[in-house]
Amino acid sequence: MEIIDVFNGDADGICALLQMRLADPHKSTLVTGVKRDIQLLRKVQASAGDRVNVFDISMEKNHSDLIRLLDQGVHLFYVDHHRSGEIPVHPGLETIIDMRSETCTSLLINQYLGGEYLAWAITAAFGDNMNNIANTLCQEQYYTSVRTEQLKMLGVCLNYNGYGETVDDLHMTPDRLFLALLDYPDPVDFINDPDSCYQLLHAGYHDDLGKAEQIDPVFRSELVEIFILPDEPWSRRVSGVFGNQLTNESPAKAHAVFTLNQQGGYVVSVRAPLVNRVGADKLCSQFPSGGGRQAAAGINHLPQCEFDNFVTAMQQMYK
């Protein structure tokens, strides 16, 4: 029997699998990619009796390959918080699906494991900009303010590393980063280890964010702000965490960060207002290649001619 672990390349996907493999060590084949590479099941080739574990990718976007694998006799364990579509009823499929805006895949795995590696789940929640629930969990564990801030920055840096058009844009490929983290049951040990890659991620994050902060919005209203970043590797890396920062700074506004791409269009990251964490998935799903979750979603390619239509749709969503 082969074990195949499929996971999103962001903080949530990595930390979800990390908790599982710390609790249940197994050698497995890793299938992952940049954060927006979500149709990962199409990369999976498995046989009857194999086990495929899936973390933090939309079932709706992988439905046909999910059915393919089930028909081949593969057992799947599927954990996610994105749009699921219709969930198949099949003896070979075990699911933990929760699309509420105040949870993430790592928090679902934390519940499944009984809190064994809670600090990594908190790290992922911070990475997904779920600061309220992450801070609450830290307070319940009596974490110091220093430890809380360490987990928050680590989550942000892990999430930041997942953004890019290809893995060449990233500081570390998600599979290498996951394997590096496996040596640290406590995330603070990873932060404090001078030989870990944490300083690389931390420095890259601050450098890229500093460039993004020099960009002025191209559209601004009472409830919506839109920014356009250039077609550069740093832009692709920072687009998501920049959107999170904008939302934290102006919690009553929805934000969209457009990044020019080489196809003559945009990659779009959308963040719903913190005070009303809904609608981002519905907005982005109006456009081909769009999807995500209620609080945060995106569009993999938006033609430049669709920019005005997007602005209109975003204003309608958040009015």
Image: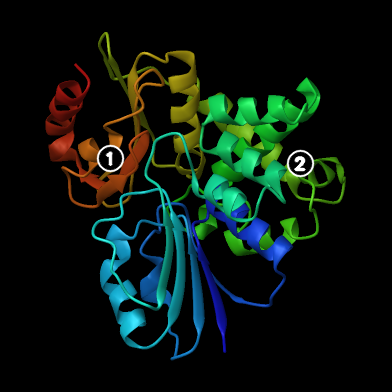
Quadrant in the picture for the N terminus? bottom right
* Residue at mark 2: 199
In the rendered image, residue 286, in percent from the top left (x then y), is placed at 16, 42
From this view, report whether residue 36 is shown above or below residue 302: below
Of 6 and 93, the residue lying toward us: 93
The answer to whether 282 appears left or right of 107 in the picture is left
Give me the disc on residue 291. Answer: none
Q: CA distance from mark 2 to mark 1?
A: 33 Å
The answer to whether 60 appears left or right of 55 in the picture is left
Of 196 and 2, the residue lying toward us: 2
Give me the disc on residue 281. Answer: 1
Quadrant in the picture for the C terminus? top left
Task: Identify the residue at image location x=32%, y=22%.
Answer: 254
- The answer to whether residue 300 shows anywhere in this view is no
In the rendered image, residue 307, in percent from the top left (x then y), is placed at 18, 33
- The residue furthest top is 222
Of 191 and 83, the residue lying toward us: 83
Q: Choose mark 2 or mark 1, whichever is in front.
A: 1
The answer to whether 151 appears left or right of 261 in the picture is right
Of 59 and 157, the residue lying toward us: 59
Task: Identify the residue at image location x=35%, y=88%.
Answer: 72
